[in-house]
């Protein structure tokens, strides 16, 4: 078998595929005309996939068109495109990956002119109640549904916004096209229009003293109904230091980004960020509790040092108030990741903030510290990827719930290392991670709906299950293989003897391998924006 990036390859770029079980291959044009042939030297055992495999290189073929590969036993790969460059190749999937956030919008009608056949009436517009003060109700409409469920969670939202707003800030040229959302044409880039929809909801989760509530969800996950048919009461769970710190960080960052477009809004975000910064000073202790009567996602964490670090650097960059620097210095004494970009570990956002700040903002020794940690991690990823035939920067233990997020945040680390150093191997290794997402993996699956001949089709996503429409909304990223899968369609018993890369089920009941979330799409937006600009 031969596994390829099912979207395809840039004519002017490196082109690798992975061959399993045999060495010889031929490349054909769509019309069955042979273009070239070759053979891998040796096959090596790959622990991630359980395959004897090698990568093959057909970089020399540059003519635009549709192609497929065939191994010596006659097995054909899916068809793929060779396009002029990454910009042309990825433009459609980039647009859909961004429009995903519009489809996650809560509290407003999705009109046919923007949503097409996936239109639906407004959802979740009733007032929510505070679990620790049930008499108190508050208007809380808006924001994005987190995932295949209809919960709205502050830390997950802040992290998705972090990926998106850094993508915009570092690569504004990638975001000039309108997205056909209600705000399109208002003079503000659509990515900022979309992010504002979530920011405005997160603002509602803040108390006057700067405390921020962790999440707003029903007490139990609702059944597989359309969002407008979900009539379960919505509870707001207690304040957590994780939510407060992520709130302070993302509001401070957003204030900086929106200042150019809407000064009054930027001031509002800044004041909100500072209020939560003050809460953090007044409450140095870790605070998080998922009330046991609430059975929705927890987003639990055992340490808030990384969240506090992110808040401190964003607040310092915005205000230059020295008090945030002392927080930064004290947290740097603790051993935490300065490159992680997921919902639980956010030290990498602090890294992005420091490393991309204007000259002189952070002292040289602070910047160096973040820089060397970042480049060490990028070097590690390059090495791991070079050690296996899928060129995936993964060990078997990396196939956890949401493994595709780890693939994509690894690719983010690599693209930023490329931005900082210009070394081509970082960009190339990032591109190999995209290859994996788009189908160069041992189950021949593109993990983005609607993109790739064998794209996954059956996400754990309530609207997709309930809407009666065959095709899923395009542009959604699946969670991906999970060696610890734990649902009825994916679990250790069903996966006995499966290699980690194959522990995946394209089934809507498989929430532990095939759900979708906002923070699995957002790193794809970042990585695509980068590779489309750079090559
Ligand atoms: O970090 C550890 C790692 O050290 C360990 O080796 C590995 C072995 O299993 O586990 C890792 O932890 C995993 C963690 O995700 C890592 O991010 C846990 O096993 C795994 O259970 C946990 O899964 C999370 C899942 O909720 C269950 O809590 C996902 O990351 C998280 O994305 C997901 O989030 C849900 C929301 O709660 C509700 N909405 C949908 C959303 C997506 O499924
Ligand atoms: O739909 C829920 C999904 O968003 C969560 O990620 C997942 C794990 O918390 O749970 C899903 O809900 C399932 C619940 O946990 C168990 N009963 C079946 C629910 C739907 O599959
Ligand atoms: Zn809703």
Image (tube, grey):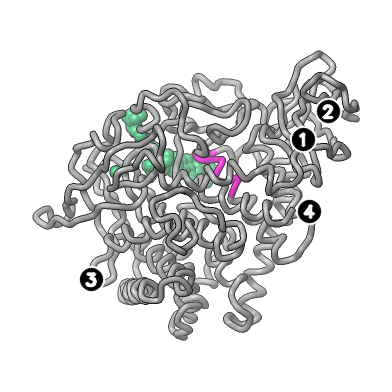
**Magenta span contains residue 233:** no
Name the N-terminal-most of marks 2 and 4.
2
Disc 1, disc 2: CB below 8 Å?
yes
Disc 1, disc 3: CB below 8 Å?
no
Question: Residue at left 36%, top 33%?
Answer: 463
* Of residues 13 and 43, the one drawn nearer to the viewer in this rendering: 13
Name the N-terminal-most of marks 1 and 2.
2
Whether ligand 1 has any atom under 8 Å from the Cβ at mark 4 is answered as no
Q: Please name the residue that numbered disc 1 is placed on.
A: 389
CA gap, disc 1 and disc 2: 9 Å
Q: Which mark is residue 43?
A: 2
* Of residues 151 and 237, the one drawn nearer to the viewer in this rendering: 151
Instruction: State left or right for residue 82 relative to residue 111.
Output: right
Q: Quadrant of ligand 3?
A: top left
Name the N-terminal-most of marks 2 and 3.
2
**Residue 6, picture quadrant:** top right
Magenta: main secondary structure:
helix
The mark lying in front, picked from 1 and 3, is 3
Indicate the position of residue 496 as horizontal and vertical percent values.
56, 20
Q: Secondary structure at mark 1?
A: loop
* Of residues 112 and 386, the one drawn nearer to the viewer in this rendering: 112
Disc 2, disc 3: CB below 8 Å?
no
Question: Residue at left 26%, top 34%?
Answer: 222
Q: Please name the residue that numbered disc 3 is placed on.
A: 208
């Amino acid at each position: 078998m031969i596994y390829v990036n099912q979207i395809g390859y840039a004519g002017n770029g490196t082109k690798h595929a992975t061959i399993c079980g045999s060495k010889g291959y031929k490349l054909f044009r769509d019309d069955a005309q042979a273009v070239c042939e070759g053979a891998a030297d040796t096959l090596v055992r790959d622990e991630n996939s359980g395959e004897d495999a090698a990568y093959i290189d057909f970089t020399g073929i540059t003519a635009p068109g549709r192609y497929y590969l065939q191994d010596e036993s006659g097995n054909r790969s899916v068809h793929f495109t060779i396009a002029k460059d990454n910009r042309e190749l990825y433009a459609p999937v980039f647009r859909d990956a961004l429009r995903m956030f519009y489809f996650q919008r809560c509290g407003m009608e999705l009109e046919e002119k923007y949503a097409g056949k996936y239109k639906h009436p407004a959802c979740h517009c009733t007032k929510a109640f505070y679990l620790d003060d049930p008499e108190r109700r508050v208007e809380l409409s808006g924001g994005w549904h987190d995932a295949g469920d209809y919960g709205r969670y502050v830390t997950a939202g802040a992290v998705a916004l972090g990926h998106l707003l850094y993508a915009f800030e570092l690569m504004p040229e990638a975001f000039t096209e309108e997205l056909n959302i209600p705000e399109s044409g208002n003079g503000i880039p659509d990515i900022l229009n979309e992010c504002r929809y979530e920011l405005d909801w997160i603002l509602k989760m803040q108390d006057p003293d700067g405390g921020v509530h962790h999440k707003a969800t029903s007490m139990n996950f609702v059944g597989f109904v359309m969002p407008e048919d979900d009539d379960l009461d919505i509870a707001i769970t207690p304040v957590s230091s994780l939510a407060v710190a992520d709130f302070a960080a993302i509001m401070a960052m957003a204030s900086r980004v929106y200042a150019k477009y809407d000064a009054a809004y930027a001031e509002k975000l800044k004041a909100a960020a500072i209020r939560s910064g003050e809460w953090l000073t007044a409450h140095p202790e870790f605070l998080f509790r998922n009330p046991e009567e609430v059975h929705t996602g927890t987003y639990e964490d055992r340490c808030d040092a990384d969240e506090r670090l992110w808040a401190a650097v964003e607040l310092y960059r915005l205000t230059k108030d020295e008090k945030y620097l002392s927080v930064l210095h004290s947290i740097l004494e603790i051993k935490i990741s300065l490159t992680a970009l997921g919902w639980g570990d956010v030290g990498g956002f602090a890294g992005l903030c420091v490393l991309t700040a204007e000259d002189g903002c952070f002292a040289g020794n602070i910047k160096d510290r973040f820089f060397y940690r970042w480049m060490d991690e990028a070097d590690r990823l390059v090495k791991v990827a070079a050690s296996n035939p899928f060129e995936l920067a993964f060990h078997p233990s990396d196939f956890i719930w949401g493994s595709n997020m780890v693939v994509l945040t690894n690719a983010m680390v690599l693209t930023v290392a490329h931005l900082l150093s210009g070394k081509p191997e970082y960009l190339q290794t990032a591109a190999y991670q995209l290859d994996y997402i788009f189908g160069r993996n041992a189950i021949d699956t593109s993990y983005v709906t609607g993109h790739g001949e064998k794209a996954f089709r059956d996400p754990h996503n309530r609207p997709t299950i309930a809407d009666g429409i065959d095709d899923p909304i395009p542009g959604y990223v699946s969670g991906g293989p999970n060696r610890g899968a734990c649902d009825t369609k994916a679990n250790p018993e069903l996966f006995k003897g499966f290699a980690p890369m194959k522990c995946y089920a394209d089934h809507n009941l498989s929430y532990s391998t095939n759900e979708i979330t906002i923070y699995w799409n957002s790193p794809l937006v970042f990585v695509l924006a980068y590779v489309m600009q750079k090559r």
